[in-house]
Image (cartoon, helix red, strand yellow):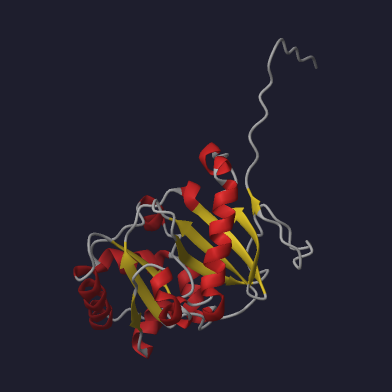
Amino acid sequence: MSIPVSTWYTDLANYTFPTVFIRLNEAEKEIFTDKKRTASIVNTLIGKIDYVIDHLPGSSFIHADSCAPTDSPLFRKSDAVKVGSVALDMLLESDKVTEAFKEEKSIRIALHPYRRVNKMREFRMFIVEGKLKGLSQRYVKEYYSRIQKRSDEIWKSAQQFCNKVADFLPEQTLVVDVYLTATDRFMIIAMNKWESCEPLLFNWDLDWEKSHGLKLVPKPIQLGGDVSVSF
């Protein structure tokens, strides 16, 4: 579960996607926690979501304050929403989202303009006492030669970004998922408490007082020549 976006958005809005929050009242929260889906309450919430979608450019991305509905079948089909009814169904289909409301880790839903992302440009920052100690490729099943060629440049840029935002982070030791735009600007996607998420290409047992740089999936080894294999 991520650190709720609403807890850090005000201080770091210029380093993330423009976001609109909808605070749910008790009856609206019960749609998620108790499955009490009175038509009038559901329709009112759909109307609130539609209002936000209508005032955002293009399609929208919806999520709970502390997690996205990535386990929803609708989300897997398309994570962009254009109408409130589909957006609400996407949240209700998600066990992650309903659990977040049950555990009171979310009391809001949020929307921002949909942006098609390139997995190659997603990274995870490991920040200790306000200093960047490691940066990992976010999707660890692929090798990206373009990122490898720019690894030194990306690491330096990530350090500069961390120095800019360090004073405004909700915690000084945490993990931050970021997206590197085509204009080489880092944008915050989510924040996680230390050791509450996967370390990806790192290990939590490392000496985090040291700097570990940018970690990328290595280039696959290609076998050449006459290779014979016997069993």
Q: Is residue 199 left or right of residue 124?
A: right
Q: Is residue 209 above or below residue 41?
A: above
Rendering coords of residue 79 (x, y %): 36, 57
Percent from the top left, x then y, of residue 222? Answer: 66, 24
Quadrant of the snapshot with the C terminus: top right
Q: Quadrant of residue 24?
A: bottom left
Q: 230 and 111: which one is in front?
A: 111
Task: Identify the residue at horizontal 53%, vertical 76% (top origin).
Answer: 3
| Residue at 55% across, 52% down | 154
Residue 1 seen anywhere in this rendered image of the structure? no
In the image, residue 218 lies at what x, y percent?
65, 39
Which residue is at the front of the view, 70 or 176? 176
Q: Tell me which corner region of the image, top left, top right, bottom left or bottom right, holds residue 91.
A: bottom left
Quarter-wise, where is residue 59 in the image?
bottom left
Residue 133 pos. (x, y %):
67, 64
> Residue 31, can we see it?
yes
Quadrant, the N terminus: bottom right
Nearer to me, 66 or 30: 66
User: Looking at the image, which residue is at 58% across and 57% down?
Assistant: 156
Q: Nearer the viewer, residue 155 or 218?
A: 155
